Image: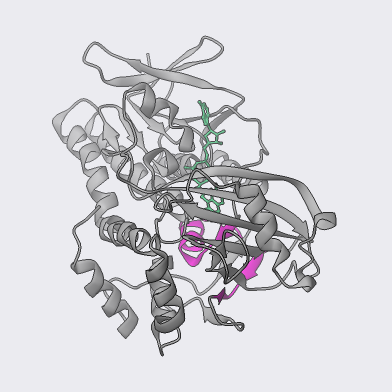
Amino acid sequence: MSEADVIVVGAGPAGASTAAHLATHGRHVLLLDKAHFPREKVCGDGLTPRAVRELDLLGVDHSTWQRNVGLRIYAHRPYPYLLRWPDLRDFPPVGCVRRRADFDQTLADHAVARGADFRPGVTVTGPLLDDHGRVVGVTTKDGRQFHAPVTVAADGNSARLALALGLQRRASRPLGVAVRAYYTSPRHDEDWLESWLELWDGQPGRSHLLPGYGWIFPAGDGTCNVGLGLESTSPAFGHTDYRALLRRWLATTPEEWGFRDACQVGPIGSAALPMGFHRPPEYRPGLVLVGDAAGLVSPFNGEGISYALESGRHAARHIAAALAAGVGTRPAERALEAYPAALRSAWGRHFRLGNLFLELIGRPEIMKLASHYLLPLPGVAQLVHRTLANLVDDPPSNVYDRIVHLLRSLVPSA
Ligand SMILES: Cc1cc2nc3c(=O)[nH]c(=O)nc-3n(C[C@H](O)[C@H](O)[C@H](O)COP(=O)(O)OP(=O)(O)OC[C@H]3O[C@@H](n4cnc5c(N)ncnc54)[C@H](O)[C@@H]3O)c2cc1C
């Protein structure tokens, strides 16, 4: 006896997107989350044009949210690179910042408005398997069982469902750690995201350069979200006091931002960033992985929200096709098995390039060479900006797109 066509575990961006798209396909979706909403999620709250495009495809109204027009990057020199979001055919030229408590609530409400049955406060403990090892539902902490022909693991970096099936993360794929805090700031409503590409483990210029970056994302509500992320390619990874590093870096930011102890709001939070397809395959019989549960954070810039939303859209399309064919039939399995290939076709080469990029910037001499000599060359900062944010038209519509497509054609898919 099935309670739903699909059970989605986790109502973050990946789960809410999957549920909303499936409900729009006319499917009965049970959306379970262990938390009661609104709930905090440690994040930078930054939404690039990729994420805004997904919100538009979902039909989520973001018109009142804090806007940004691009990225202001500090790297080596005292004045920044001002890099507007590109004017493209496939993406809007605007980003947003929205606190996750509110962002995730909005998405969950949207899924409900589309017809999903959202049950907060339900902790899923593991998958239910049939005699052939196929996932046919989930068990919960309060002893209940829910059945459905397809289950979606959208449970974030904890990846409880995947781990219960023995789906370990690939150690060869990068993993990041990021910390963030909120500060009240007179510059809380600026319309640029700011990024500092040089993180030092001591005195700037006189200590070791760390592979990662610091961010300042004005949230428009009186506060800025500030934080930093480090990659696993760094020798310092795992041996760094990230909170102390954040305080040290903030102490070097200009006084007018107000990032001093007295202005801090709430505690510093930290969490992992699972990157570059780190838990393949993203489909096992009866179970589809989306978002962080599948390790879909971009190795280039630590962006995970847009990829979570997008993976939900792809997953919903494949699940809807399988349900239409009748789950258990060969055509239905083929539709589900095609989901990992769809993800790779969308970002496989981009993520592979990103993995290589992380290996390179993990070597301080290369990072130094890039920020001192390459970035200031005409057009290079713009090219890097578009490559890192994965903002290119397909097929290409300008010279930057063409170069990025060429670079991608040189590497295999992740
Ligand atoms: C410090 C930091 C800063 C970041 N900044 C940015 C940024 O600025 N922009 C960006 O795009 N990305 C950013 N990211 C990445 C981004 O936060 C994630 O990629 C994104 O949240 C992934 O969405 P998700 O839906 O897959 O998982 P999550 O958002 O983690 O949602 C998972 C949901 O599953 C629920 N859940 C978990 N286990 C269970 C269970 N057993 N039973 C029921 N429910 C369960 C949780 O309660 C949660 O609601 C950042 C990450 C970190 C750590």
Identify the residue shown where x is 85% and y is 55%. 262
Quadrant housing residue 325: top left
| Residue 148 in the figure: left or right of residue 69 | left
| Residue 392 in the figure: left or right of residue 156 | left
- Residue situated in front as seen by the camera: 218 or 232: 232
Residue 34: give x, y in percent of width and height.
Answer: 58, 27
Question: What colour scheme has been applied to the protein in the rendered image?
Answer: one colour
Magenta region: 46-74
Quadrant housing residue 392: bottom left
Q: Which part of the image, by quadrant, shows the N terminus?
A: top left
| Residue 216 in the figure: left or right of residue 395 | right
Q: Is residue 265 visible?
A: yes
Residue 348: give x, y in percent of width and height.
Answer: 27, 55
Q: Residue furthest front?
A: 206
Q: Is residue 5 visible?
A: no
Residue 206 on the magenta segment: no
Residue 50 on the magenta segment: yes
Residue 210: give x, y in percent of width and height.
Answer: 50, 60
Q: Is residue 81 above or below residue 172?
A: below
- Residue situated in front as seen by the camera: 360 or 284: 360
Q: Is residue 97 above or below residue 174?
A: below
Q: Residue furthest left?
A: 330
Identify the residue shown where x is 17% and y is 28%. 329
| Residue 241 in the figure: left or right of residue 289 | right
